Amino acid sequence: MKIALVGASGNAGSRLLRELSVRGHAVTAIARHPVRIADLAGVTAREADLEETDDFVSALSGHDAVISALPFSTTDGDALIGAVRSSGVKRYLVVGGAGSLQVAPGEKVIDQPGFPDAYRPEASAGSDFLDTLRGADDLEWTFLSPSAEFVPGERTGTFRLGTDTLLSNEDGSKISFEDFAIAMVDELETPKHVRSRFTVGY
């Protein structure tokens, strides 16, 4: 498939880029600084900025799917979703956050005692972004939330999937960027969570 990947040089984005390349997809890696994009098979780096709307929409157009891996707290979510709409691409996958997951019915991670203040702006913005997506019936969107610890690690291919509840085990709640990328590209290739959120963890 032809994939537009926004935020391709970040922690999650760079692992998604590698996973997409390994699986033989043609990827347009969109970034403000394309020199940071890894030189991989099937990858074309393109400079584009969400603030330059027409150019950004043009960069997305003509692809089978858009994947965004941008931080929520520093991204204009309405502008990003609007750009995907304007591009004509219907399939839209989002690297989400864990803050909006539930630990019990109606109880979000972000609302638990001891939730780090440093992470609150990003978690809150991610929750708002998900709420906006849930009203986007014109897009075939998917929001993939990582576990609480989203960190560099190994590509094991062994993990669990859930829906709206934080996954955890005896070692806590964790997923590597590498295994997250597997789950995301699996969803791209074989959609099972269209217009819904799901989560991945060990």
Image (cartoon, grey):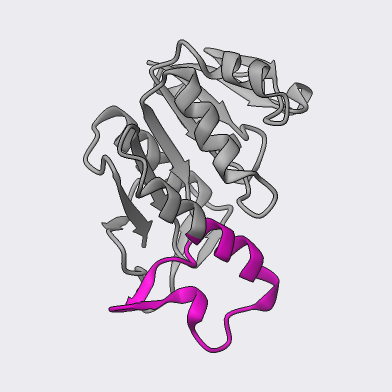
Q: On the image, which quarter does residue 52 sit in? A: top right
Question: Is residue 75 in view?
Answer: yes
The x, y position of residue 6, in whole percent, is: 58, 31
Image quadrant in which the N terminus is located: top left
Q: On the image, which quarter does residue 69 sit in? A: top right
Q: Is residue 184 above or below residue 96?
A: above
Front-most of 24 and 143?
A: 143
Question: Is residue 155 in view?
Answer: no
Q: In the shown orientation, is residue 130 left or right of residue 193?
A: right
Front-most of 30 and 20?
A: 30
The x, y position of residue 60, in whole percent, is: 53, 19
Residue furthest bottom in the image: 113
- Residue located 50% across and 58% down the image: 128
- Residue located 32% across and 78% down the image: 106
Q: In the shown orientation, is residue 48 left or right of residue 138?
A: right
Q: On the image, which quarter does residue 200 sit in? A: bottom left
Count how many numbered circles sit on residues in the image.
0
Image quadrant in which the C terminus is located: bottom left
Q: In the shown orientation, is residue 89 left or right of residue 117?
A: left
- Residue located 67% across and 77% down the image: 117
Asked if residue 111 lies in the magenta stretch, the reply is yes
- Residue located 40% across and 67% down the image: 101
Front-most of 116 and 170?
A: 116
Q: Is residue 39 above or below residue 69?
A: above
| Region of the chain picked out in magenta, as a range | 98-127
